[in-house]
């Protein structure tokens, strides 16, 4: 099983997103998975030009000459890919959105209808998708757009962590709570790597409150 995380935080390795991503990959590695953690911010990625050459002239092949060629190969070789992004303005980062746009060569121009919804078809068998996202605010509303957009990817697991600005804070009490949360993230990584699903117990650990709202607001000084 090959699991690849594509991290769309501009903070790359030092991101709150990466705290969750690394725990997930550690879990996957613990059951023998081959893992890769890609920081999109370190890659040379132009914007999609919308020329559709990758559909009609050179199927599967983008005209742009940058790091996307290698990332497309990695994407197609993975059994599970994870889109990991912080919430910026109620949505994924521009870095992640650009990467998703550049994935269009793995799609084909054939239109598929599913219960009145129209979509592109995949050009070949695609990896399963996991979503990891963290938001700086408490509550769930900041994930609404991400959840809606990611429905199209039919994810096998979505990890949405609010109160995300605490994840890398250097304080013993905070880190104790973060570590207890990350145990569930590691278990999720191990379970996805072994069986492509997680138990209800792990799911409820992932979705449990990290901090009461008033405590978190105090922590971040809001
Ligand atoms: C430009 C910008 C926009 C943001 N927009 C939101 C937002 O809409 N909702 C939210 O909850 N947090 C928002 N945040 C806070 C980030 O989600 C938060 O700092 C997160 O922990 C960053 O994760 P990272 O370290 O992985 O990049 C924003 C941060 C920035 C810099």
Image: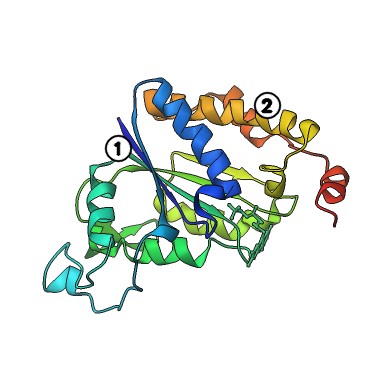
Q: In the picture provided, is 129 more to the left or to the right than 146?
A: left
Q: Which quadrant of the picture is home to ligand 1?
A: bottom right
Label for residue 180? 2
Give the vertical position of 91 relative to 137 (above or below).
below
136 or 109, nearer to the observer: 136
In the picture, measured across the screen, residue 17 lies left or right of residue 62, that is right
Give the distance between the C-alpha atoms of the residues marked 2 and 1, in whole angstroms: 28 Å
How crowded is the residue under tag 1: few (<14 C-alpha within 10 Å), some, or many (20+)?
A: some
Badge 2 or badge 1: first in the primary sequence = 1
Q: Residue at x 57, y 62 (%)?
A: 91
For the residue pair 221 and 150, the one nearer the viewer reads as: 221
Q: Is mark 2 within 8 Å of ligand 1?
A: no
Identify the coloring: rainbow
* Residue 138 point in image, percent of width and height: 75, 50
Q: Quadrant of residue 128?
A: top left
Mark 2 crowd level (few <14, some 14–19, many ≥20, 10 Å Cα)? few
Is residue 200 among what the camera can see? Answer: yes
Residue at figure coordinates x 31%, y 60% from the top left: 103
Q: Quadrant of the N terminus?
A: top left
Question: Quick one: SS at disc 1?
Answer: loop
Task: Name the quadrant containing residue 63.
Answer: bottom left
- Percent coordinates x, y for residue 129 in the rendering: 40, 44
Q: Which mark is residue 202?
A: none
Viewer-closest of 47 and 119: 47
Tell me, yes or no, if residue 195 can be seen here.
no
Q: Quadrant of the C terminus?
A: bottom right
Instruction: Name the residue beneath numbered marker 1.
Output: 79
Name the element at disc 2.
helix
Q: Position of residue 212 (x, y in %)?
A: 83, 40
């Amino acid at each position: 099983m090959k699991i690849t995380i594509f991290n769309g935080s501009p903070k790359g390795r030092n991101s709150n997103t990466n705290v969750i991503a690394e725990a997930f990959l550690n879990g996957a590695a613990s059951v023998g998975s081959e893992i890769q953690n890609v920081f999109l911010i370190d890659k040379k990625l132009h914007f999609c030009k919308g020329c559709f050459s990758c559909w009609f002239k050179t199927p599967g092949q983008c005209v742009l000459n940058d790091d996307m060629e290698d990332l497309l190969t990695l994407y197609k070789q993975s059994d599970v890919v994870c889109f990991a992004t912080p919430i910026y303005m109620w949505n994924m980062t521009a870095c992640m959105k650009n990467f998703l746009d550049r994935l269009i060569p793995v799609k084909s121009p054939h239109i598929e209808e599913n219960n009145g919804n129209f979509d592109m078809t995949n050009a070949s068998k695609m990896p399963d998708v996991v979503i990891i996202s963290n938001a700086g605010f408490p509550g769930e509303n900041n994930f609404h757009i991400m959840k809606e957009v990611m429905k199209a990817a039919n994810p096998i697991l979505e990890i949405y962590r609010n109160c995300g600005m605490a994840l890398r804070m250097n304080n013993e009490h905070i880190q104790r709570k973060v570590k207890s949360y990350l145990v569930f993230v590691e278990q999720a990584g191990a379970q996805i790597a072994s069986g492509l699903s997680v138990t209800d117990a792990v799911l409820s650990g992932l979705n449990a409150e990290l901090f009461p709202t008033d405590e978190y607001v105090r922590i971040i000084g809001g």
